[in-house]
Image: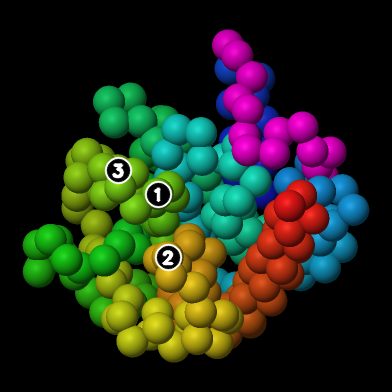
Amino acid sequence: MNNSVLALRQRQIASAQREYKARGSKLARCECCLLAVSLCICDKVKIANSNVAVCLLMYHNESFKPSNTGRLIADVLPDNHAFRWDRTDPDPTLLALLSSPFYQPIVVFPAEGVESERVISKVEREEGKKPLFIFLDGTWREAKKMFRKSPYLDSFPVLSIAPDKLSDYKLRVAPHEHQLGTAEVACVVLEECAEHDAAQKLTDHFVDFRDAYLKGKRSKL
């Protein structure tokens, strides 16, 4: 499995000066899905047939969190890339990816507060290039900070998903009060871009993950 988020996590662990303690750190976890070993869902993962790529720009320790759903996207989409966000010293590999002639970078972010000329509601594929969807993975406050303070993203269009599309998906998967997570937004983006196989497989994977994660939380009560 070519999961760039897990690879990033391992690099961060190797370079960390002290161990990061995520919530539930004493639990015996699968090293891939980060769920309790007894609830592992790795054998259910199905790789999608897809003609898009994803780049997950992850806030600081986001890759360590067992609850992170960006990792699920990297499970399903073969062409995936993940980087730790840095305001002043972005990873040279990230910059090379963004400038590659083989990719069409598109930032996935709400339209509110974004220059109108940058906002798109539909992806027009450029000939010879694969859409590269850039997800800012962190809390909503962290995502806004990454968007504002990443000048290397300023030249790219911003794909904004209409609220009704998000609401439709939210109702299909299960209602909850907080904003949709990274994987859930990715499902909507993939469906809107006619990547139906990827959208369905990611939705299925997210539901499996969510159910197992909640089951694990309930068992600790």
Q: Is residue 143 left or right of residue 201?
A: left
The magenta stretch is 17-30
Asked whether 28 falls inside the magenta stretch, the response is yes
Q: Is residue 60 left or right of residue 152?
A: right
Instruction: From the image, tell me which residue sits under label 2.
Output: 178
**What residue appears at the point 34 percent right and 63 percent down from the top-left corner?**
108
Q: Amino acid at mark 3?
A: Met
> Where is residue 100 shown, x and y percent of the image?
40, 49
**What residue appears at the point 26 percent right and 43 percent down from the top-left corner?**
145
Does the residue at mark 3 contact the one at mark 1 (Cβ under 8 Å)?
no
> Where is residue 96 shown, x and y percent of the image?
40, 40
Q: Nearer the viewer, mark 3 or mark 1?
A: 1
Q: Amino acid at mark 2?
A: His
Does the residue at mark 2 contact the one at mark 1 (Cβ under 8 Å)?
no
| Residue 146 image label | 3
Of residue 198 and residue 114, the one placed in the foreground of this image is 114
